[in-house]
């Protein structure tokens, strides 16, 4: 290991030590009760709620996946995704946050998303709770795998050690930290990690643009690539059978620009629909100290999101200008290392280590949320509600930690493939949550006529269609090539409306609670 790499390692180890320190600090309080462990006693302030929500949501794909897409195929995919996410963030905080904060308290003081849905419809047989918990387990396991892929790529690229071993080391660190501190530790550290992430993106954007000769030079280079700098086309790297981009006369080879029509734009914008069903974001709405603080939190979250997404997209363009040909960046999967390559080449080692801790920050802030929510979904909503109704808080937390370990192991198995593309893994899990929970969250909060049967039909339709569209219909191409979240979301909404209208109206108690939540909001 050379001197520069050693300094990078030292900076990252120091950062990890701070994160562990936060976990230790909150460990005692988090273990006081399941409500403290899973929801922090509803004590988050606006800054922590907003920044931790965005950091846990964005994950490593913000610093690796999104710049990688922009580097590989240009603006269109990356920009329309970013616009959809930015709009989704704002609308979710505007419409959902206040109503959910009040309704989750009114509906039996729910501390998890499955809890809220079950209490909202006053279930005696916990069907909604079980379905919700199972989908959370499935999709958060996939999400956790994407985080472990990020860890593996980061450390493997930095230190030249095998991807698999580095992925396992990163996963062990994340799991150890999550076991220690619970929701409060996760939220406090996520706030710090959101600061590190936006600092990392900004410093690389500025130094990269300067190194390329200014932003004008970056745009000039992008214009030479067919479809690279347009919102209605997409660049098409020419690759060999192994997916490696071809090079001629020292320059990367691109084919004719691909088409990027209205249907594709709608498909990509539909990423924003996913926010209505993201448990890690919805929990922050439930956990904020006072609902009045949600206005400030919305502004903080929206500004952070806009700056970070814009910086991530432009970094991909900067990377293509500075490193049009690079052995690490010559595949779609390898392109996701562009942020790491820029950091190593442009910054002094210690600063590069701090900046690349931003990737680690993004990964930790997301994976701890995913693991914790998935573990709570099983321990509270399946183990305690179905199998051992008299389970103590201590037994629930022991079970949650066991499940957390099992989820992590499955996630590591999924992440073993070094050619995994982070953006692709995240897009599937994002679609799953958006289609399963997004429609039923909106209808539960804003349509009094929604019935329990409608809720079940909507969740099952949304979840099933994500798999059917992704695995069976999308490969057909054409109109079926649309991102699976959009059709699954629409069909889930349709199922909720049709089945609710065909079944008996909700009871008077359910309607009274709905009115109380509406009035409080």
Image (tube, grey):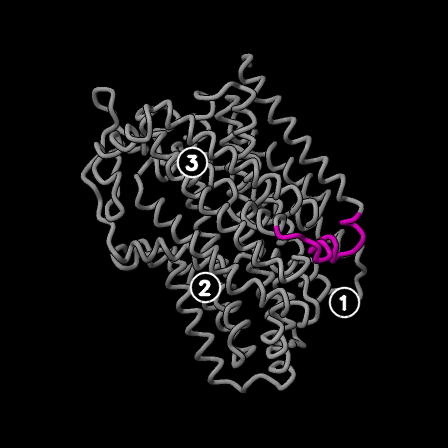
Dot 1 or dot 3: first in sequence order is 1
Tag 2 residue: 464
Dot 1 or dot 2: first in sequence order is 1
- Tell me where residue 329 sits by quadrant: top left
- SS class of the residue under badge 3? loop
Which residue, as the protein is rendered here, is positioned at the far left?
Answer: 256
Span shown in magenta = 29-46
Residue shown at 60% from the left, 27% from the top: 12
Residue in the foreground of this view, choosing between 411 and 426: 426
Label 1, label 2: how many angstroms apart (C-alpha)? Answer: 30 Å
Q: Report the side of 91 relative to 102 (left or right).
A: left
Label 3: how many residues lie within 10 Å, few (<14), some (14-19) or many (20+)? some
Dot 2 or dot 3: first in sequence order is 3
Whether the magenta-drawn stretch holds residue 9 is answered as no
Residue 497 to residue 410: above or below = below
Whether the magenta-drawn stretch holds residue 41 is answered as yes
Tag 3 residue: 419
Q: Are marks 1 and 3 in contact (CB under 8 Å)?
A: no
Label 1, label 3: how many angstroms apart (C-alpha)? Answer: 44 Å
Image coordinates for residue 481, horizontal then vertical, percent: 30, 55
Residue shown at 36% from the left, 40% from the top: 69
Image coordinates for residue 462, horizontal then vertical, percent: 46, 65
Image coordinates for residue 124, horizontal then vertical, percent: 67, 77
Residue shown at 53% from the left, 19% from the top: 349
Label 2: how many residues lie within 10 Å, few (<14), some (14-19) or many (20+)? some
Tag 1 residue: 389
Residue 115 to residue 82: above or below = below
Q: Report the side of 227 relative to 177 (left or right).
A: left
């Amino acid at each position: 290991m050379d001197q520069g790499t050693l300094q990078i390692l030292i900076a990252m180890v120091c950062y990890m030590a701070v994160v562990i320190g936060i976990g230790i600090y909150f460990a005692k309080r988090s273990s006081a009760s399941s409500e403290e462990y899973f929801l922090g006693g509803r004590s988050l302030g606006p800054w922590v709620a907003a920044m931790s929500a965005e950091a846990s949501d964005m994950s490593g794909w913000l610093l690796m996946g999104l710049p990688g897409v922009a580097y590989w195929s240009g603006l269109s995919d990356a920009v329309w995704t970013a616009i959809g996410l930015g709009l989704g963030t704002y609308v979710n905080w505007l419409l959902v946050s206040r109503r959910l904060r009040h309704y989750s308290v009114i509906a039996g003081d729910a501390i998890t998303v499955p809890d809220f849905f079950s209490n909202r419809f006053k279930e005696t047989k916990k069907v909604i709770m079980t379905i919700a918990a199972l989908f959370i387990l499935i999709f958060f396991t996939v999400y956790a795998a994407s985080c472990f892929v990020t860890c593996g790529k980061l450390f493997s690229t930095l230190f030249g050690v095998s991807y698999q071993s580095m992925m396992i080391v990163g996963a062990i660190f994340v799991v150890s930290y999550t076991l220690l501190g619970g929701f409060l530790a996760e939220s406090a550290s996520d706030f710090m990690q959101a600061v590190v992430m936006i600092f990392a993106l900004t410093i690389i954007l500025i130094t990269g643009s300067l190194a390329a000769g200014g932003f004008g030079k970056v745009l000039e280079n992008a214009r030479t690539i067919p479809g690279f700098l347009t919102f209605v086309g997409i660049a098409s790297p020419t690759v060999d059978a192994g997916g490696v981009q071809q090079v001629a006369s020292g320059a990367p080879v691109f084919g004719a620009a691909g088409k990027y029509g209205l249907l594709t734009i709608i498909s990509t914008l539909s990423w924003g629909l996913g926010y209505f069903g993201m448990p890690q974001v919805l929990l922050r709405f439930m956990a904020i100290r006072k609902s009045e603080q949600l206005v400030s939190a919305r502004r903080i979250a929206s500004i952070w999101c806009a700056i970070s997404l814009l910086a991530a997209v432009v970094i991909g363009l900067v990377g293509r200008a500075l490193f049009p040909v690079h052995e690490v960046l010559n595949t779609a999967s390898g392109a996701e290392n562009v942020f790491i390559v820029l950091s190593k080449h442009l910054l002094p080692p210690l600063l590069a280590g701090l900046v690349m801790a931003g990737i680690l920050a993004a990964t930790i802030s997301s994976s701890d949320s995913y693991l914790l929510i998935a573990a709570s979904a099983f321990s509270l909503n399946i183990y305690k509600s179905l199998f051992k109704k008299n389970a103590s808080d201590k037994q629930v937390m022991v079970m949650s930690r066991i499940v957390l370990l099992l989820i992590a192991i499955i996630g590591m198995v999924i992440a073993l493939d070094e050619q995994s593309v982070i953006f692709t893994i995240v897009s599937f899990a994002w679609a799953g949550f958006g289609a399963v929970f997004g429609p039923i969250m909106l209808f539960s909060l804003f349509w009094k006529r929604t019935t329990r049967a409608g809720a079940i039909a909507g969740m099952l339709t949304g979840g099933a269609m994500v798999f059917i569209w992704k695995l069976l219909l999308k490969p057909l191409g054409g109109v079926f090539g649309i991102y699976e979240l959009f059709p699954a979301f629409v069909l889930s909404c349709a199922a909720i409306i049709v089945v609710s209208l065909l079944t008996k109206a909700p009871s008077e108690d359910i309607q009274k609670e709905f009115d109380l939540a509406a009035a409080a909001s």
